Amino acid sequence: MIKSKSLILRTATRFLLPLQLLFSLFLLLRGHNEPGGGFIAGLVAAGAIALYLIAFNVDETRELIRFSPHDLFGVGLFLACIAGIPPLLMGHPYFTALWWRPEFPFFGEVSLSTPLLFDVGVYLTVIGAVLAIVLALAEAED
């Protein structure tokens, strides 16, 4: 894929990428109580990186992400699967939601849960899958 010749697109992409990734994290974290969650947040993050791919090229995009999408996909699947193990260890059915509220210095009480771990796994899996497809299509075009 040839680098875009549009200076406006390349400049706007540099500003939009962090905003889109931040918005995807917002969607990920609010997904338990309101619309959002791992799937749509992963699509937004993958869309941000796909925009970078369109504005620049495959090599610069791979340099930006610094990891293999297949590895990200595997880590996401692993996290999503192990989200069901803590309930089993506590005598509950697989994928029963559990919450912990540990206190951290400077942050206070933080709510951690198995649904959040599952959503993070879905988030990483979706990003990995979409990026693997998009990067493979872009490389095939070259």
Image: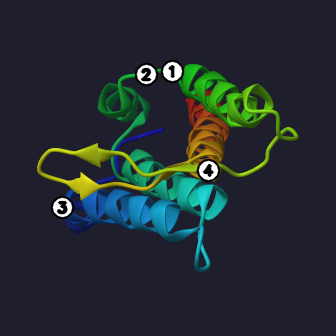
Is 106 placed above or below 76 here? below
Return the residue at label 1.
68
In the image: residue 5, left or right of residue 47: left
| Image x and y of residue 98, in percent | 65, 49
Residue 50 - label: none
Q: Which element is circle 1 on?
A: loop
Question: Residue at horizontal 58%, vertical 47%?
Answer: 123
Q: Which badge, 1 or 4, comes first in the chain's sequence? A: 1
| Residue type at numbered disc 1 | Ser
- Within-10-Å neighbours for mark 2: few <14, some 14–19, many 20+: few
Q: Which badge, 2 or 3, comes first in the chain's sequence? A: 3
Return the residue at label 3.
11
State yes or no: discs 1 and 2 in contact (Cβ < 8 Å). Answer: yes
Q: Which badge, 3 or 1, comes first in the chain's sequence? A: 3
| Residue type at numbered disc 2 | Phe
Of residues 114 and 72, the one drawn nearer to the viewer in this rendering: 114
| Residue type at numbered disc 3 | Thr
Q: CA distance from mark 1 to mark 4?
A: 20 Å
